[in-house]
Image: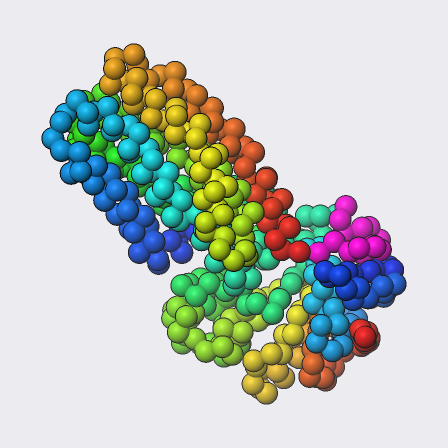
Amino acid sequence: MLEADNLECVRGERRLFAGLGFRLEAGELLYLQGRNGSGKTSLLRMLIGLLPPEAGEIRWKGESIKALADEFRADLCYLGHLNAIKEELTPLENLLAAARLADEALSEDDALDALEQVGLAGREDLACKYLSQGQKRRVALARLVKEKRPLWILDEPFVALDLAAVDWLAGIISAHLQRGGLAVMTTHQLVDIPAGTVRELRLS
Amino acid sequence: MAVVGRDLKLAMRRQADIVSALFFFVIVVSLFPLGIGPEPDLLRKLAPGVLWVAALLATMLSLPRLFADDYRDGTLEQLALAPHPLGLIVTGKVIAHWLVSGLPLALIAPVLGVQFDLSADALLVLTGAILIGTPALSGIGAIGAALTLGLRGGGVLLSLLVLPLYIPVLIFGAGAVDATVTGLGGEGHLSLLAALTSASLGFAPWASAAALKIALE
């Protein structure tokens, strides 16, 4: 489904990696590992199409993601290391606004249910600026609860989460993989995700 | 569009921004009659230029934040990844920007025009000109805001980039009021202003989108 071929990444004067390739099929998870600055985030940004690779190609269902454009983005869910939530809006409004911008149908009940699952019940109507770092991260992660798109690209999803939330997120990701979804993620802490195939890619 | 709704909601939660730009406009315009003194002929002559220059500067105030907040909290990435062309999304943001910056200016301009002893006709044309011309300011401003995104000291650079591009809007906007005051009729100027607005609304969002993509790399 997702193939990367001979990718090369140059940031500034430095070549971070070259000749990088992998294949990921439905139900598979790819762990990206590597030191700080080894190009994990750059690779993720290439996979979502925001950073054009210096050389090489990325294909989704056999076609280049550049040619697919909107069609590829309709299959993609990206969670960056920034939370992409608005401090002035409440968690509920943030969730609904994000879904509407991404052209997804999300009812208010579904959104409330998602917030309850991430442990934010009772805080739906509090502006996000009053939430803690971990709670903000949970608002961002609440998007994943109802997310049905096949390709998830997650940049350090476990950062700022407590142990219970880490377990919960591992469960969500594994349920996604069991539905036949794909996931690519970077992480420094190895979390055990019960899934069919877990691949690892180490950048150095 | 979803972006317009979201941006308007955000603006309502942060009303201080709208109010401060509006107050800036009111105060700058009001300083002129106070400084120049009660000479109706001179004031009538100065009015179009003063009102329009103040409108340009008031619009400039809110421009740096057009994309900067979304860029900082990662929302801009999500907008760029939405399954719509980024140009359309920027169009939505430009419309929202106009609704909270240009529209209030147009609504308050006739009240300020009274200080300059403008006739009812001239006040009407002034309101119309600001109403028609300010969308162009938001559109052209979006290009500058996108180009200076993430730069340190981008605010000053933004003014240097955008203000020269505002000159045609200033000339035809002030010209429309001027022509009405002198009895020539401002329709020609207003048509040109409308042409500028439609051209910049058609073109600017796509140029801004290209600049935003570079900023996101």
State the colouring used for the structure image: rainbow
Residue nearer the viewer, A129 or B3: A129
Residue nearer the viewer, B101 or A117: B101
From which residue to which does the magenta span run? A51-67
Residue nearer the viewer, A179 or B10: B10
Vertical placement of residue B74 versus B144, above or below: below
Image quadrant of residue B118? top left
Residue nearer the viewer, A12 or A36: A12
Q: Is residue A63 magenta?
A: yes
- Residue pictured at 82% horizontal, 66% vertical: A17
Residue A57 shows up from this direction: yes
Q: From the viewer's perspective, is A56 left or right of B158? A: right
- Residue pictured at 61% horizontal, 53% vertical: B215
- Residue pictured at 53% horizontal, 74% vertical: A138
Q: From the viewer's perspective, is A119 left or right of A58? A: left
Q: From the viewer's perspective, is A10 left or right of B129? A: right
Image quadrant of residue A51? bottom right
Residue lying furthest front: B36
Vertical placement of residue A24 versus B3, above or below: below
Residue A92 pos. (x, y %): 45, 65
Q: Which quadrant of the figure contains the N terminus of chain A?
A: bottom right
Residue B93 shows up from this direction: no
- Residue pictured at 75% horizontal, 49% vertical: A66
Q: Is residue B135 magenta?
A: no
Residue B58 pos. (x, y %): 34, 43
Residue B35 pos. (x, y %): 17, 38
Q: Which quadrant of the figure contains the C terminus of chain A?
A: bottom right
